[in-house]
Image: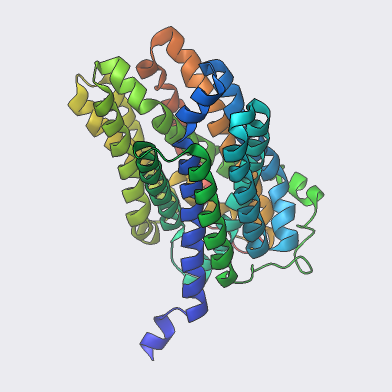
């Protein structure tokens, strides 16, 4: 009898596998594109500043999509949203691959659509992940995000292999797009129904509902926590290699290994973190990890040599691992309002990915990239102060 009560139903297990595939596919898609940025840059003859403007198309598409994602998911459901966005991503990534020999314009259009697909996909799969988490009765959202991290690693490895053997950019991007699109569109058929349907949810399917959500103090505080951790994550991904090379005089290979150490630590934290969350709760774990990330960041910046920089990168990555997924879980505590709240929190978090790299770069021009990374510490301290907003919320509560 006990085994029957504690064993998840087959449909929940199928939905869990489907969510893992959705997260992994999303990460694989992003890394597939990122792995070919140098070849696209060279093909278009872009300077660093012009490349930055081209890449801004992804962030712009994501922000537009995230603003609309709450009503979209509430109206059509997470299953239909992810399936549709997987199809759009297939078109978008293929358009980039086909269009880049012809100029900047088709690439920017493709990247805008890529960002749009990624934004709504992100919100929808987090909503479904929260549904699965609730039905399982234990914290599992960080492991879904670990799936995203594993997808990025796999995509980067495949991309590096494609570059090494001379696979053309067009063939690589189209092949990756078809693989991801088909696998994910098939996988999401196992998604379960969202807990709140448009007919019963409080006007959550409207844009007005999402706009009202922007005035909820708890949702905004959760967004601030996610913003801080997204900034910590994004700064590490974008700048650790450069900081190790420029700040410690290390070679390019050492810089890449430091980045790999950071990414590995984040993946490990997301995979093993759920047990800590179930035992100690969101607030305690997130505050402890904030302290750990701060310690790692300061060791990375102020340490005397490359060895301490590596140790700092590991602690920084481990500490930064759970903030974003825990914020998604907290935003989705009330199923009736999950789509709108996840949309708002994700939008706030993505602002860190949009503004973080330029901010660190601007500060780096004045005080060095290594020292500029201390800006991350300020937001992490704020996150620790407002982490109480992550406490579980009863359904239909405010």
Query: Based on the displayed image, in which of its 4 quarters is residue 58 positioned?
Result: top right
Q: Residue at x 62, y 58 (%)?
A: 82
Query: Based on the displayed image, in which of its 4 quarters is residue 369 positioned?
Result: top left
Q: Is residue 270 above or below residue 4?
A: above
Residue 123 seen anywhere in this rendered image of the structure? no
Residue nearer the viewer, 206 or 19: 19
Rendering coords of residue 179 (x, y %): 51, 56
Furthest residue toward top: 366
Rendering coords of residue 302 (x, y %): 27, 20
Rendering coords of residue 117 (x, y %): 64, 47
Residue 125 seen anywhere in this rendered image of the structure? yes
Residue nearer the viewer, 196 or 47: 47
Residue nearer the viewer, 103 or 259: 103
Q: Which residue is drawn at 67% across and 57% down?
A: 84
Rendering coords of residue 361 (x, y %): 47, 17
Q: Residue at x 44, y 7 (%)?
A: 366
Quadrant of the image containing the C terminus = bottom right
Quadrant of the image containing the N terminus = bottom left
Q: In this view, does 208 lie above or below 164?
A: below
Q: Is residue 34 above or below residue 171?
A: above
Q: Which residue is drawn at 63% across and 60% down?
A: 83
């Amino acid at each position: 009898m006990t085994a029957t009560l504690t064993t998840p139903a087959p449909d929940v297990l199928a939905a869990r596998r489907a969510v893992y595939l959705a997260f992994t596919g999303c990460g694989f898609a992003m890394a597939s594109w990122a792995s070919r940025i140098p070849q696209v840059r060279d093909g278009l003859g872009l300077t660093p500043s012009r490349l930055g403007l081209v890449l801004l198309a992804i962030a712009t598409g994501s922000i537009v999509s995230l603003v609309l994602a709450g009503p979209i998911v509430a109206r059509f459901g997470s299953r239909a949203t992810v399936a549709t966005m997987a199809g759009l991503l297939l078109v978008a990534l293929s358009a980039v691959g086909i269009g880049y020999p012809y100029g900047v314009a088709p690439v920017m259009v493709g990247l805008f659509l890529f960002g749009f697909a990624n934004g709504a996909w992100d919100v929808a799969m987090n909503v479904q992940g929260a549904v699965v988490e609730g039905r399982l009765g234990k914290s599992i959202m960080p492991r879904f995000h670990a799936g995203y991290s594993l997808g990025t690693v796999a995509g980067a490895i495949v991309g590096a292999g494609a570059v090494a053997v001379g696979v053309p950019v067009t063939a690589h991007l189209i092949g990756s797009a078809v693989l991801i699109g088909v696998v994910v569109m098939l996988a999401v058929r196992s998604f379960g129904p969202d807990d709140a349907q448009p007919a019963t949810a409080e006007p959550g399917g409207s844009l007005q509902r999402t706009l009202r959500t922007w005035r909820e103090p708890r949702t905004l505080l959760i967004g601030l926590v996610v913003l801080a951790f997204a900034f910590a994550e994004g700064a590490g991904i974008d700048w650790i290699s450069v900081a190790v090379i420029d700040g410690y005089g290390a070679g390019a290979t050492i810089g890449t290994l430091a980045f790999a150490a950071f990414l590995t630590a984040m993946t490990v934290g997301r995979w093993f973190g759920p047990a800590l969350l179930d035992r100690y709760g969101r607030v305690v774990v997130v505050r402890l990890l904030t302290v750990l990330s701060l310690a790692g960041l300061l060791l990375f910046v102020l340490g005397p040599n490359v060895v301490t920089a590596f140790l700092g990168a590991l602690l920084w990555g481990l500490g930064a691992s759970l903030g974003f997924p825990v914020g998604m879980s907290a935003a989705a505590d009330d199923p009736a309002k999950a789509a709108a709240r996840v949309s708002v929190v994700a939008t706030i978090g993505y602002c860190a990915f949009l503004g973080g790299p330029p901010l660190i770069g601007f500060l780096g021009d004045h005080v060095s990239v290594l020292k500029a990374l201390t800006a991350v510490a300020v937001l992490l301290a704020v996150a620790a102060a407002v982490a109480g907003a992550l406490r579980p919320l009863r359904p239909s509560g405010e």
